[in-house]
Amino acid sequence: MDTVDIVVVGAGLAGLSAARTLRNAGRSVVVLEARNRVAGRTFGGFLRNGVPVELGGQWVGPTQDAVLALVDELGLETFRTHDEGDGLTAYDGTVTRYADETFGLPEASAAEVGKLLAEIEELASTVDTHAPWETDGAEDLDRQTLDQWLTARTDDTLALGFLRLLVPALFSAESPELSLLHFLFYAKSGNGLDTLVATTGGAQESRVVGGTHRISERMAEELGDAVRLGAVVHTIVQDGDGVVVRYENAAGGGGGAVAARHVVVAIPPMLAGRIRYSPPLPALRDALTQQIPAGSVIKFQVGYPTAFWRDTGLSGFVLSLDGEVGVVLDNSPEDGSCGVLVAFVEGAHARRAAELGPDGRRKLVVDRLVAYFGPAAADPFDLVEQDWTAEEFTRGCYGGRLGAGVWTQFGRALAAPVGRIHWAGAETAETWNGYMDGAVRSGYRAAAEILEILAAEQG
Ligand SMILES: Cc1cc2nc3c(=O)[nH]c(=O)nc-3n(C[C@H](O)[C@H](O)[C@H](O)COP(=O)(O)OP(=O)(O)OC[C@H]3O[C@@H](n4cnc5c(N)ncnc54)[C@H](O)[C@@H]3O)c2cc1C
């Protein structure tokens, strides 16, 4: 059995950031990754013409300082998301074009949305992102679902529909599936709802040249043979002296074990709950892992010979209350060699679309793009899809969410180490929770926890 200072479970952004930090601090590490690739939820793909497209996490933006600094350190570059031109909003069977802040909603509904968003921002500003359960009035905020709060606030059905649409766009889950406290926490952790939904000046501002998977690939290159692919961790045993992390080979044919002083588990909490621990995890931690399900999303990258929508002054941005494709953005390459629309089928729509089969989904997506952009959208040269709920080692996206009562009853177990086991992953971040930036920060936090303990042990 190999022996190192720290074993890291999961070679996504969180695990690799932790491993790299620990290695740079002079500690020996092994990273065990179940898939035969690194990058987890930032998987990259290609269109038929060779243009790289992001099948998972893709945008970075201002205040995401950890991931932006990492991109820079690793010698990668970013470029701006195309955001010029008018947006489209689809509702009540029509597609409305707009160039202002109204999202194409009628004046009264736009004002109602504005009023509710301001109320959300104000409430969110009161949340303690370090310990959400200690927020003033936490019990009350956590007792209700976001949907209960919204429906009690407005009887403008269009405004309500619009705000409900933002929820799958951010969580790939529906508004009854998360608590008001979780929504407020998430908004504050990402610098406010305005930042979360904005392209320029917000979370969708930029992309990484070549794709975000390159961040993980570069870190894995630095770590060399410390990263073991195809190693599915199934058991973690700890005692006073250290941990033993056991894995099976994904390809079959046995497995192995690595002994270490500490382990960082950098996988989504729900998957962390499927590992066997000896001694068993405290009941609070185990119960928590049963209550952070991820949402459902199928992401489509649709390639056209040109970004034809730009010719008529459209930005490519669509929000739709009608049909399955709720959000669309221009995802064309920086060099303009072709046009790409990225389309998201989220939440309840994704669960239904998963049953259609690839041809049915292709038709569903292309038909909606035609409804938004006209007949020129009918004939893409390629369409690449990624269903994240079908992925054994992710099981849903964008990340785990907390339903009513979960933060206040179980939240304190989310990032608190259990003996020699330290938790990382985007879900454990207090800043940019659920985002690539949060994943990187969580890796740094877990590494810092361990380095502090090891330094203290050395006297
Ligand atoms: C469609 C989509 C769009 C998104 N858009 C954005 C965006 O635009 N901007 C943004 O910032 N974020 C976005 N995100 C979220 C972002 O991608 C994630 O928050 C981030 O990548 C999570 O990183 P992580 O390291 O915490 O987890 P993961 O990337 O999930 O890494 C966990 C790793 O652990 C491995 N693993 C799981 N179980 C085991 C096991 N038993 N043994 C060994 N290994 C195991 C997995 O294979 C995986 O590689 C998006 C996500 C998706 C899916």
Image: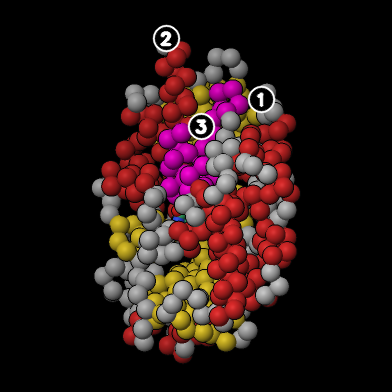
User: At numbered mark 3, what does the secondary structure look like: helix, strand or loop?
Assistant: strand
Tell me the residue at 44%/40% (across/down): 441
Residue 386 is labelled as none
The span picked out in magenta is 417-445
The one nearer the camera, 21 or 133, is: 133
Residue 459 is labelled as 2
Q: Judge the density around disc 1: few (<14), some (14-19), many (≥20) Cα neighbours within 10 Å.
A: few
Q: Name the residue that disc number 1 marks.
A: 278
Numbered disc in front, either 2 or 3: 2
Verify whether residue 430 appears in magenta: yes
Distance of mark 2 from mark 3, alpha carbons? 23 Å
Which of the two labelled residues, at mark 2 and mark 1, occupies the earlier sequence position?
1
Q: Judge the density around disc 3: few (<14), some (14-19), many (≥20) Cα neighbours within 10 Å.
A: many
Q: Where is the C terminus found, in terms of image quarters? A: top left
- The amino acid at mark 1 is Ser
Tell me the residue at 48%/51% (across/down): 190
Numbered disc in front, either 2 or 1: 2
User: At numbered mark 2, what does the secondary structure look like: helix, strand or loop?
Assistant: loop
User: At numbered mark 1, what does the secondary structure look like: helix, strand or loop?
Assistant: strand
Q: Name the residue that disc number 3 marks.
A: 264
Q: Is residue 76 left or right of residue 236?
A: left
The one nearer the camera, 305 or 180, is: 180
Percent x, y of residue 450:
47, 25
- The amino acid at mark 2 is Gly
Which of the two labelled residues, at mark 1 and mark 3, occupies the earlier sequence position?
3
Distance of mark 1 from mark 3, alpha carbons? 15 Å
Verify whether residue 16 appears in magenta: no
- Above or below, 73 against 201 in this view is above
